[in-house]
């Protein structure tokens, strides 16, 4: 007779000696490979891409904006201080400045994600791969690291985990981190000193300024055109991104490269992007028509974080509208609200963050209304038939 043999669980498997670390070990084990497990029964969706691979595509789409932002940090430092630097020196300077932001973002954010996964005995979600990549790109390069750590912790705990983690949050966590910094430490998030990083003992050259073009918008087009001696604020300069601003938000060219990747792979909704642009141009044109501002409407698309927010934030599949018609409404309102805030709220020049967070709250209502309208129309057609 064969003896009954019991299979002992592995060291990190549930029931093993270190089974309490199962979620952590599983997260690292499946980071770059697909597990060999297969479904045995029932109906399942079979696809070559899973959540982890989808999020990695988003990370790759963000890389061009991140690389340009690192170079621009060094470039702005060179212009403001008068120190001659080659393009590689400028990039290396910016890389060393941005790297600590990424380390804090991922160490704090992933640490909290792993802790919650272990406490719940669940798999570690891959959602923070994108959030951790975005947060350093939407803050000033010289933001104190302890402030960034607090913002990341607040965003992950109160923006995601208290609602159940990735897929259950109704607010974009990266924007929530920026909002925390803006309202808790406004001096570090605005003004002319927040966007130029200086070494100890360095001072700005005469005529240099660290103010962003968006901060001068309220003073009119003439003030915008003559705001600084060290860089141009023409449309093409703003489009290229050689101006002060958050690390990854200045270059529309780099952001558009990411947009092409997201649309081509089907990861992000082009409807939200197009409708957001349409909303911004509509309100901007109406403001020009009414004399509320003399800044051309198309300038709204290349200033501040509009392009970055439209491509990478508004299209977040968890917090955005889900219905096809709802995506058009959702995107249009984001673009319109962004420009409205910029024009009529002198205390806060950048309206993209508030517009997206506000519409995150209304996205379920938009989907509900769209669904109800379609259902009622279908019911009427059936009744008539």
Image (cartoon, helix red, strand yellow):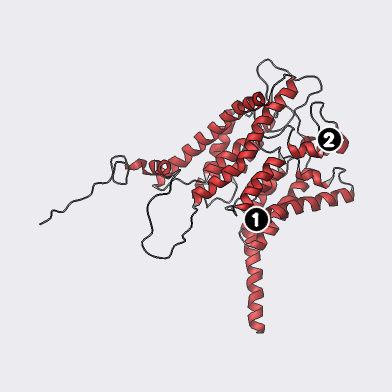
**Residue at the extreme bottom:** 385
Q: CA distance from mark 2 to mark 1?
A: 34 Å
Specify the farthest residue to the left. 1
The residue identified by callout 2 is 224
State which mark lies toward you, 2 or 1. 2
Residue drawn where x is 67% and y is 54% of the image: 270
Q: Quadrant of the N terminus?
A: bottom left
Specify whether 380 is left or right of 28: right
Q: Is 152 displayed left or right of 75 in the figure?
A: left
Q: Does the image show residue 304?
A: yes
On the image, numbered disc 1 is attached to which residue? 362
Measured from the top left, where is residue 121 in percent x and y?
A: 38, 47
Q: Secondary structure at mark 2?
A: helix
Q: Nearer the viewer, residue 279 or 112?
A: 279
Q: Quadrant of residue 134?
A: top right
Which of pointers 2 and 1 lies earlier in the amino acid sequence? 2
Q: Nearer the viewer, residue 336 or 147?
A: 336
Disc 1 element: helix
Q: As drawn, which residue projects farthest toward the top? A: 201
Between residue 123 and residue 263, name the one nearer to us.
263
Residue 65 image position (x, y, % from top left)? 65, 38
């Amino acid at each position: 007779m064969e003896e009954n043999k019991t299979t002992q669980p592995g060291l990190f498997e549930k029931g093993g000696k270190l089974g309490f670390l199962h979620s952590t070990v599983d997260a690292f084990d499946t980071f770059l490979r697909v597990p060999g497990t297969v479904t045995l029964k029932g109906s399942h969706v079979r696809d070559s891409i899973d959540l982890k691979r989808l999020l990695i595509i988003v990370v790759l789409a963000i890389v061009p904006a991140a690389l340009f932002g690192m170079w621009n940090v060094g470039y702005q430092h060179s212009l403001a201080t008068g120190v001659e630097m080659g393009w590689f020196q400028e990039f290396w300077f910016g890389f060393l400045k941005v790297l600590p932001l990424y380390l804090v973002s991922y160490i704090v954010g992933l640490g909290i994600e792993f802790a919650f996964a272990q406490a719940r005995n669940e798999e570690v979600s891959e959602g923070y791969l994108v959030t951790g990549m975005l947060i350093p790109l939407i803050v000033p390069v010289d933001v104190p690291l302890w402030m960034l750590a607090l913002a990341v912790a607040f965003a992950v705990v109160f923006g995601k985990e208290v609602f159940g983690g990735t897929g259950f949050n109704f607010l974009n966590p990266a924007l929530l981190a920026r909002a925390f910094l803006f309202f808790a430490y406004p001096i570090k998030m605005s003004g002319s000193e927040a966007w130029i990083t200086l070494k100890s003992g360095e001072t700005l050259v005469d005529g240099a300024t660290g103010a962003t073009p968006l901060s001068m918008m309220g003073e009119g087009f003439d003030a915008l055109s003559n705001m600084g001696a060290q860089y141009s604020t023409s449309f093409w300069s703003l489009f290229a991104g050689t101006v002060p601003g958050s690390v990854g938000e200045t270059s529309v060219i780099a952001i558009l490269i990411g947009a092409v990747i997201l649309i081509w792979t089907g990861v992000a909704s082009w409807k939200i992007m197009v409708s957001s642009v349409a909303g911004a141009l509509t309100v901007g044109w109406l403001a020009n028509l009414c004399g509320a501002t003399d800044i051309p409407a198309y300038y709204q698309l290349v200033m501040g974080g509009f392009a970055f927010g439209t491509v990478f934030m508004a299209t977040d599949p968890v917090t955005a509208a889900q219905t096809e018609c709802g995506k058009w409404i959702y995107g249009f309102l984001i673009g319109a609200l962004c420009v409205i805030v910029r024009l009529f709220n002198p205390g806060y020049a950048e309206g993209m963050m508030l517009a997206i967070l506000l519409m995150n709250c209304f996205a379920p209502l938009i989907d509900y209304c769209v669904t109800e309208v379609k259902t009622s129309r279908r019911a009427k057609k059936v009744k008539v038939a």
